[in-house]
Image (cartoon, rainbow, N blue to C red):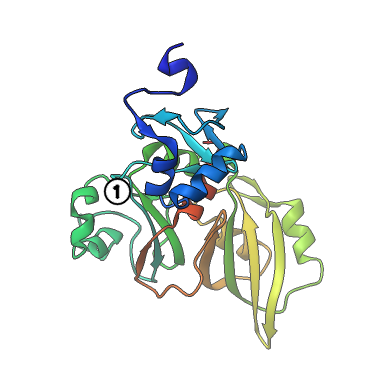
Amino acid sequence: MTAGSTGHDPDGVRLQKVLARAGVASRRAAEDLIAQGRVQVDGETVREMGRRIDPDTAVLHVDGARVTLRDDQVYLALNKPVGLHSTMSDDLGRPCVGDLLADRVELMNAAQRLFHVGRLDVETEGLLLLTNDGELGHRLMHPSYEVPKTYLAEVEGKIARDLGRRLRDGVELDDGVARVDTFKLVDMVPGRSTVQLVLHEGRKHIVRRMLAEVGHPVQRLVRTAVGEVRLGNQKPGKLRPLDRVEVGSLYKAVGL
């Protein structure tokens, strides 16, 4: 049998060693994962300890979540502040995402290939993903994969009891109907409310336009999550690398 048909590469690296290098588990614990049938190589469940693979070409999953094996792939989360443009450079000299990478020496080699996954308008803050993984980035941005995005919005006015239903049923905009997946009232004080919305489409200014259409103009908008990757307590303007579990969750969300 050929290496291509079995996923075994006689000149490759032992599977448990690859798992340990990727930070999945110690080599001994990785052997247990393999023995329990929790590891797949190129779609095939592997149980034998002697399997060798090429880390540069093999597609590896553990418990259904893909494991990143390439050292040159970068996955970052940025808490984009208000006033920063979602571009890697700006011809007009306006502050942009690319400016934040200028002083990151460890990213210098990858910076030319990094791109932002989707956009946040200049007045919107929160989670923006950056990567040089073209296939993952493309799928995360493509509406057919329906990756959910979570927002917190401070809006004008008191929230009516039926607003969630109206937003789930759909709001007619000038470019078609827009719907949220879920809606929750977080807080309400005189003249102002905070709501959480989850939706999987990415039309321009979609959250602002929906809320304005139902009579609640947005005063502040923060994206708090993309899929299972969450902003948490990350400070505005700060970058952090995604961990293995977060990257795996993004791969899983888009079927990779």
- Residue 66 in sight: yes
Residue 145 in percent (x, y) is at 57, 39
Residue 125 in percent (x, y) is at 44, 68
Hey, which quadrant is residue 196 in on the image? bottom right
Left or right: residue 71 versus residue 16 is left
Residue 77 in percent (x, y) is at 41, 60
Near-viewer residue (252 or 5): 5
Give the residue displayed 51% in from the left and 68% down from the top.
222
Near-viewer residue (172 or 242): 242
Give the residue displayed 53% in from the left and 30% down from the top.
48
Above or below, 26 against 15 in this view is below
Residue 210 in percent (x, y) is at 62, 59
Name the residue tied to disc 1.
Answer: 114
Single out the residue that lies furthest toward the top: 1
Give the residue displayed 33% in from the left and 61% down from the top.
85
The amino acid marked with disc number 1 is: Leu
Above or below, 231 against 173 in this view is below
- Badge 1: residue crowd in 10 Å (few <14, some 14–19, many ≥20): many
- Residue 143 in sight: no
Single out the residue that lies furthest toward the bottom: 190
Left or right: residue 8 versus residue 216 is left
Secondary structure under badge 1? loop
Near-viewer residue (240 or 130): 240
Label tally: 1
